[in-house]
Amino acid sequence: MQPDPKHSVGVLLSRSEALSAQQFLAAGIARLNRVALVSSFGADSAVLLHMVAQIDRALPVLFIDTLALFPETVAYQRDLAAHLRLSNVQSITPDRSELFTRDPDGLLHRSDAESCCQLRKSEPLGRALQGYDGWITGRKRYQADTRALLERAEVEPATGRIRLNPLANWDADRVADYLDAYDLPRHPLVAQGYPSIGCAPCTTRVNKGEDPRAGRWRGSAKTECGIHFTGGVPRPIRQEDAA
């Protein structure tokens, strides 16, 4: 009989405070039947990718190529995966026929950024995650108000899949220290003023003193692409699930 993912992660949660990020990640990978790391290969991505490489270089790594990324991101994905010797990086792209129908001129982001993210990110990822019991994200509480209450593990209401967030309680200094400690390659755009990197049309440089994610969807109220919000809202595992 396959283990129940909720029970497995409930056990993880009950012990997670004593586990380092690396230990939590290893335990989650071991307890979930099928799990993948979803990575943007962005500014901080090398941390989790390095941790995964120490555990299992063949773990599925799902890279969402929206077909609107910076060329630097595509090159960084290739170079970092080779540097870490990750053997199962899968590029997830939007459905070409849907792109032609819903965004034929590639300008949907200007009129409806939410629908553009849905088309280029959420829907492709949803298809790619079918059959998985859980997935790993690099989200951190300090990154945005919408992530301030982030748990190390969550249950998606609509799918029952588990989201593991090993770095939930890390801050920017801790991320930088890890990158330095292991001499990990940085995304080339970070040095050019991009501490948070998404699609090229919707990402701008961040000025000194601004929030690190201020360059994402600048000038709008949008702060998240939506891939982490099943049904529109995040939901941590309930206390009774962790028993």
Image: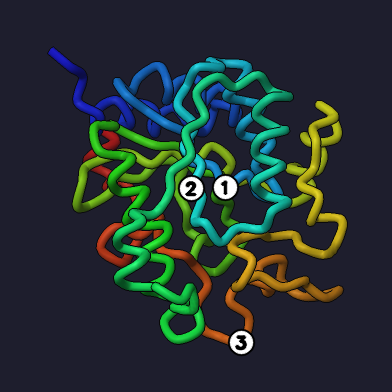
Q: Which residue is mark 2?
A: 64
Outermost residue, top direction?
1
Kind of residue indicated by mark 1:
Ser
Could you tell me which residue is drawn at 62 percent across and 31 percent down?
49
Circles 1 and 2, Cβ within 8 Å, touching? The answer is yes
Q: Quadrant of the N terminus?
A: top left
Q: Which residue is mark 1?
A: 40
Horizontally, residue 57 falls left or right of residue 128, namely right
Where does residue 31 sit, x and y in percent of width and height? 35, 19
Kind of residue indicated by mark 2:
Ile
Snapshot quadrant of residue 127: top left
Could you tell me which residue is drawn at 32 percent across and 72 percent down?
102
Could you tell me which residue is drawn at 59 percent across and 31 percent down?
21
Q: CA distance from mark 3 to mark 2?
A: 24 Å
Q: Secondary structure at mark 2?
A: strand
Q: Which mark is residue 219?
A: 3
Decide: few, some or many residues near mark 2? Use Cα within 10 Å; few <14, some 14-19, many ≥20: many
Q: Nearer the viewer, residue 120 or 6?
A: 120
Where does residue 10 sit, x and y in percent of width and height? 31, 32
Snapshot quadrant of residue 192: bottom right
Horizontally, residue 191 falls left or right of residue 21, namely right
Where does residue 135 sit, x and y in percent of width and height? 39, 37
Decide: few, some or many residues near mark 1? Use Cα within 10 Å; few <14, some 14-19, many ≥20: many
Horizontally, residue 222 falls left or right of residue 54, namely left
Q: Is residue 19 above or below residue 91?
A: above
Q: CA distance from mark 1 to mark 3?
A: 23 Å
Mark positioned earlier in the residue sequence (3 or 2): 2
Q: Nearer the viewer, residue 119 or 216?
A: 119
Q: Secondary structure at mark 1?
A: loop
Could you tell me which residue is drawn at 43 percent across and 66 percent down?
117
Circles 3 and 2, Cβ within 8 Å, touching? The answer is no
Decide: few, some or many residues near mark 3? Use Cα within 10 Å; few <14, some 14-19, many ≥20: few
